[in-house]
């Protein structure tokens, strides 16, 4: 039975503002870690006025310690990374040499391949450390006032959670469900979280589909195109293509290497499982997206430009979901020899929008920017057997 007294929350963004009052409500000692002195000072100034307020849950709470020092941050029983994926490895690397021999470290959300830097930095010196990865962030949330107030716009019904080693998933899910008041559901292994990360299909798929013929128009606020409600039959076909490449890769991996990947769903299965109650017409995938009431009114990510708005090509829908999502699956498909024409098209063209060349001209993962992607090959894992064993915490 795990005993948790002290929790470190890494990050000072929207999600941290939700997590801290919840943890304090459980009577836990909470440290907030950010490497940025300015952010730490701003957080301290905010909480000096009474602690973060979450009106919806009628909670209020402050971290006991706010630190920029990894030595202090690492002294905890549980370390939660509530950060964009690009900050995971930097954070794990900073904390690694100070971690206690027994500690639980995990990411909410993990995106794809969180287990790779976690194995490299967290498990290196002690196999007693538990690593967990969560499928998504439970909340849609925004800071109202920094260090002072947060607004939760929506909460997901359940969140998949996998651990290394897999036998800890049930216990960690139970623990986090209690602390964070969300239903965490154990998943069979971290590979299923990485390949089953549906954001890698939906976000780059819709962004690419909606913007591939963008003509440089500057939109007024009312003209900004809808995101999910803008899904055409053509965009849905693209998502189905991306999704099939991932699901078939998972099937091959599972058949040839005896690993359970049934939890890697198609985009349609995922959508119906998550939103059946709010979808008005599921006769095609495009209609299911367009008529999902939960997606109503959400627009393309934009930035201000010349008194109007233009697409934000640097949005996390591309900068996070390609190098920490689609490229992971592409790299695994390469290992098992499954062709990926849809992934190649999106990674190559949308990659150009974010100024990155991840693939070479033949579609291989040897482009000049591939070192920035969280793919197994960048962690010296080059064959499927090794990948499966690593995801189960078995050292080769
Ligand atoms: P945020 O943008 O509010 O917070 C980002 C935080 O990351 C910053 O406060 C900073 O402390 C930290 N950070 C940035 N660069 C860093 C670095 N190099 N090293 C260490 N720390 C660094 O993010 P938010 O909204 O809290 O989201 C966290 C994750 O959850 C992201 O992956 C986001 O895409 C995802 N997510 C967020 C949702 C939301 O409604 N806020 C909804 C669904 C997913």
Image (cartoon, rainbow, N blue to C red):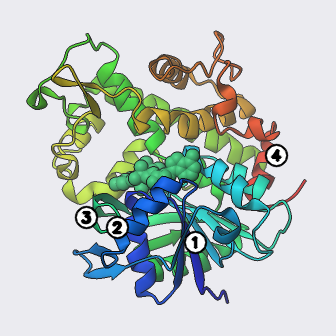
**Is residue 232 depicted above or below 255 in this figure?**
above
Residue matched to label 4: 385
Q: Is mark 4 within 8 Å of ligand 1?
A: no
Residue matched to label 1: 8
**Is residue 61 depicted above or below 353 in this figure?**
below
| SS at badge 2 | helix
Residue 338 in picture, x, y percent from top left: 66, 28
Camera-side mark, 3 or 4: 3
- Give the alpha-carbon distance from disc 3 to disc 1, as whole Å: 22 Å
Mark 1 touches mark 2? (CB < 8 Å) = no
The residue at 41%/77% (across/down) is: 62
- Give the alpha-carbon distance from disc 4 to disc 1, as whole Å: 34 Å
Mark 4 touches mark 1? (CB < 8 Å) = no
What label sits on residue 151 in the rendered view? 3
The residue at 55%/54% (across/down) is: 110
Mark 1: few/some/many CA within 10 Å (<14, 14-19, 20+):
many
Which of the two discs, 4 and 1, labels the residue nearer the N terminus?
Answer: 1
| SS at badge 4 | helix
Camera-side mark, 4 or 1: 1
| SS at badge 1 | strand
């Amino acid at each position: 039975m795990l005993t948790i007294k002290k929790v470190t929350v890494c990050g000072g963004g929207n999600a941290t503002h939700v997590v801290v009052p919840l943890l304090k409500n459980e009577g836990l000692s909470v440290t907030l870690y950010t490497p940025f002195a300015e952010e730490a000072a701003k957080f301290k100034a905010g909480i000096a006025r009474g602690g973060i307020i979450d009106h919806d849950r009628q909670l209020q709470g402050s971290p006991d310690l706010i630190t920029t020092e990894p030595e202090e941050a690492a002294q905890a029983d549980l370390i939660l990374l509530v950060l964009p994926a690009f900050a995971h490895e930097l954070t794990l690397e900073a904390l690694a040499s100070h971690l206690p021999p027994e500690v639980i470290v995990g990411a909410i959300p993990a995106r794809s391949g969180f287990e790779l830097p976690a194995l490299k930095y967290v498990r290196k010196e002690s196999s007693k450390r538990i690593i967990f990865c969560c499928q998504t962030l439970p909340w849609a949330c925004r800071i109202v006032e920094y260090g002072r107030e947060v607004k939760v716009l929506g909460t997901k019904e359940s969140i998949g959670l996998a651990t290394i080693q897999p036998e800890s998933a049930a216990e960690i899910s139970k623990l986090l469900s209690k602390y964070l008041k969300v239903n965490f559901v154990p998943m069979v292994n971290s590979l299923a979280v990485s390949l089953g990360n549906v954001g890698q299909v939906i976000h780059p798929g819709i962004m690419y589909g909606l913007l591939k013929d963008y003509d440089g128009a500057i939109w007024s606020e009312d003209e900004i195109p809808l995101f999910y409600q803008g899904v055409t039959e053509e965009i849905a076909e693209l998502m189905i293509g991306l999704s099939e490449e991932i699901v078939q890769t998972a099937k091959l991996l599972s058949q040839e290497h005896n690993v359970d990947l049934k939890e890697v769903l198609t985009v349609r299965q995922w959508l119906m499982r998550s939103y059946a109650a709010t979808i008005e017409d599921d006769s095609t995938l495009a209609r299911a997206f367009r008529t999902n009431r939960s997606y109503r009114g959400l627009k393309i990510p934009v930035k201000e430009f010349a008194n109007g708005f233009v697409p934000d090509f640097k949005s996390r829908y591309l900068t996070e979901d390609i190098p920490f999502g689609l490229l992971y699956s592409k790299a695994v498909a390469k290992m098992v020899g499954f062709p990926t024409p849809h992934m190649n098209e999106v990674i190559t063209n949308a990659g150009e929008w974010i100024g990155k060349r991840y693939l070479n001209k033949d579609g291989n993962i040897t482009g000049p920017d591939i070192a920035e992607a969280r793919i197994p090959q960048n962690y010296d894992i080059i064959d499927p057997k090794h990948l499966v064993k690593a995801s189960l915490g078995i050292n080769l």
